[in-house]
Image (cartoon, rainbow, N blue to C red):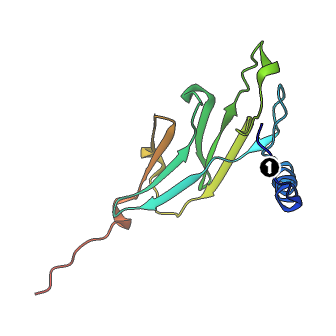
Amino acid sequence: MTLMRWSPWQELESVNSQLSRLLEGNSTVAGTESGQWAPSVDIRETDDALLVQAELPGIDKKDVQVEVHDGVLTLSGERRYEKDLKEENVHRIERAYGRFSRSFSLPTHIDTDKVDAQMNDGVLEIRLPKHETARAKAIEIR
């Protein structure tokens, strides 16, 4: 058996971390689902489109909805908690479960009729093409 020096600061930091997760709504208790969580999202712009990538590991694409309405892109869905019959061996649960929703205002130059979404390896990729008139155009100087 190894003796370890007790540190009140380490214990305080642990309590602070748990309290932060509770207040953010990202904490779960074994066997229950939390109310809400938010996946990480990257948004990039190219000359011809906006590219949105959302991290959704462990979520099936049938559990994800992508909607564009009135200039707003909304990603929503649910990560379900899989109950295991042998939960007495669970030591820690840090992943968030339950419903999620993220909404982003879109610029007016997005062609919403040509939006494309794909899910690969737990990453949702959405391509929002720009209208032809909004794309950069090189002008020849005479």
Residue 58 appears at what percent x and percent y?
59, 31
Residue drawn where x is 75% and y is 35% of the image: 93
Numbered disc total:
1
Label 1 SS:
loop
Residue drawn where x is 42% and y is 45% of the image: 114
In the displayed structure, does residue 106 sit left or right of residue 88? left
In the displayed structure, does residue 64 sit left or right of residue 11? left
Residue drawn where x is 80% and y is 49% of the image: 4
| Amino acid marked by disc 1 | Met
Vertical side of 108 occupied by 33: above or below: above
Q: Nearer the viewer, residue 48 or 53?
A: 53
Vertical side of 142 occupied by 49: above or below: above
Q: Residue furthest bottom?
A: 142
Q: Nearer the viewer, residue 99 or 141?
A: 99
Q: Quadrant of residue 60?
A: top right
Residue 74 appears at what percent x and percent y?
63, 47
- The quarter of the image holding the N terminus is top right
Vertical side of 25 occupied by 104: above or below: below
Q: Residue furthest left?
A: 142
Q: Read off the residue under disc 1.
A: 4
In the displayed structure, does residue 107 sit left or right of residue 82? left
Residue 87 appears at what percent x and percent y?
79, 19
Residue 6 appears at what percent x and percent y?
86, 54
- The quarter of the image holding the C terminus is bottom left
Residue drawn where x is 62% and y is 28% of the image: 63
Q: Label 1: few (<14), some or many (≥20) within 10 Å?
A: few
In the displayed structure, does residue 89 sit left or right of residue 139? right
Q: Residue furthest top?
A: 85
Q: Nearer the viewer, residue 90 or 20?
A: 90
